[in-house]
Amino acid sequence: MKWGRGYGIIILFLMLAMPAASEERSRAVYPEAGILFSGILVQPAAGFWYGRWGVRISGMYYRDDWYQFHFNLAWAFYDRPEIQQSLTIHTSHIAGSDPGAEYNFWSTGLTYSINFHGLFAELGLGVPWKDNLGNLKNDPVVPWGCLGYIYRFTPRE
């Protein structure tokens, strides 16, 4: 099997970013809660972590044609009390409008998230798999991103 340069860079990055086994928290189980801003709505977020694996849901319903709901399945490749970096599989249902465009679609994709002392950012791409209005038929991917504050209720060490 031939590995491309991109895969090698990703694997090297993950290996360097991995904490040593002696420094890693052993099976920490904790919830998280916060507020996110994703461009069209401010929305509450809640999640739960078990060791390196976590789930997060967020969303807000404003009116029939303006809402967002998100589900993330996450893997933290770097996890310390002050900072957490993770890769997530992200599924969204988004409806809203921008000047000159309306949208209502489902998408699934990959995102990178970082939580630094509660300040949270997430950025990634999703593949629209259900477009209720038909205006994303020429878009193979859609961007996803949000900023906000998520408090991690990590256990005291």
Image: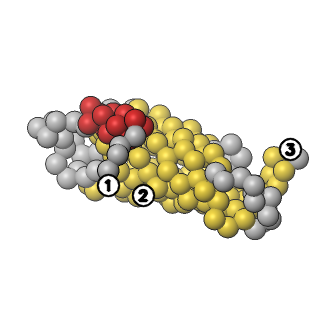
Which residue occupies the foreground of this view, 39 or 110?
110
Direction from residue 56 to residue 102 in the image, left or right? right
Instruction: Compare marks 3 and 2 and give the one earlier in the sequence.
Output: 2
* In contact (CB < 8 Å): disc 3 and disc 1: no
C-alpha gap between disc 3 and disc 1: 38 Å
Label 2 CA crowd tier, 10 Å (few <14, some 14–19, many 20+): some
Return the residue at label 2: 73
Looking at marks 3 and 1 on the same chain, the residue that comes earlier in the sequence is marked by 1
Local secondary structure at mark 3: loop
Q: Position of residue 131 (x, y in %)?
A: 72, 65
Which picture quadrant has residue 152? top left
Q: Amino acid at mark 1?
A: Trp
- Quarter of the picture holding the C terminus: top left
Say which element carries label 2. Answer: strand
Q: Which residue is mark 3?
A: 99
Q: Is residue 30 above or below residue 122?
A: below
Name which residue lies at 40% across and 40% down: 4
Q: Which residue is mark 1?
A: 53
The structure residue drawn at horizontal position 58% and vertical position 42%, both measured from the top left corner, is 146
Question: Callout 1 environment at 10 Å: few (<14), some (14 to 19), or many (20+)?
Answer: some
Number of numbered discs present? 3
At mark 1, the secondary structure is strand
Amino acid tagged 2: Leu
First reached walking from the N terminus: tag 1 or tag 2? 1
Judge by depth and name the residue closer to the eye, 83 or 135.
135
**Residue placed farthest to the right in the image?**
100
In contact (CB < 8 Å): disc 1 and disc 2: yes
Picture residue at 75% right of the left edge, 55% below the top: 138
